[in-house]
Amino acid sequence: MAKSTLPEVWLRGPLKGTPALLQPVAHALLQAREELDELMNGFPDELLWEKVAGMASPGFHLQHLTGVLDRLYTYARAEPLTKEQLNYLTAEGKPTNKTYTTIELVSNFNNQVDNAITQLRGTEEGVLTDFRGVGRAQLPSTVLGLYVHSAEHTMRHLGQLIVTVKVLRNK
């Protein structure tokens, strides 16, 4: 896959239909998706669960990126996590009977970014400062806090994934 010659997403202008205050969140998620897609293109499935220096595997990061977006956007809607979401959280990065492929895990992440962008577009700016409880303890946040954290957390894990994948590719 050829490296994009486009400027970073945030330099391409406003995203149609996305509230102005949520543009940076949408830009960050779309940038992460582009970088992740390029990074993982052709990544061997047999290296998905390899760890470097005891750090998390690429498979974990891919599962976690998808799961975190799902959970944070659920909280932003003021909904509790479902049993399926809690099971997914527990299973992130753990061995299962299912064999995952790089393409499948990347596709899952891309779909979750699409879901996040759809939710951002449907968010009224007037609710951005509304309280949202996080987790069983209902720790205090806001709709905007959850959205901003989703972008920050995604980029943090993407950075870790970049290093891990580059080391594994060069072993």
Image (tube, rainbow, N blue to C red):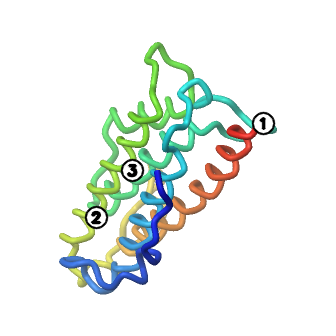
Percent across and percent down for residue 79 are: 27, 53
Distance from label 2 to label 1 (Cα)?
33 Å
Asked whether disc 2 touches disc 3, contact meaning CB atoms under 8 Å apart, the reply is no
Say which quadrant the C terminus sits in. Answer: top right
Residue 75: image quadrant is bottom left
Sequence-first disc among 1 and 3 = 1
Q: Residue furthest right?
A: 53
The label nearer to you, 2 versus 3, is: 2
Residue labelled with disc 1: 54
**What element does badge 1 sit on?**
loop
Whether residue 76 sits left or right of residue 95 in the image: it is: left
Which of discs 1 and 3 lies nearer the camera? The answer is 1
Specify the amino acid type for callout 3: Arg
Amino acid type shown at disc 2: Ile
Secondary structure under tag 2 reads helix
Checking the image for residue 162, the label placed there is none
Q: Position of residue 76 (x, y in %)?
A: 32, 63
Q: Residue at x 43, y 45 (%)?
A: 67
Mark 3 surroundings: few (<14), some (14-19) or many (≥20) residues within 10 A: many
Above or below: residue 164 compared with residue 156: above
The disc, 2 or 1, on the residue closer to the chain's N-terminal end is: 1
Q: Secondary structure at mark 3?
A: helix
Q: Is residue 120 left or right of residue 97?
A: left
- Mark 1 residue type: Gly
- Please name the residue that numbered disc 3 is placed on: 71
Residue position for label 2 = 117
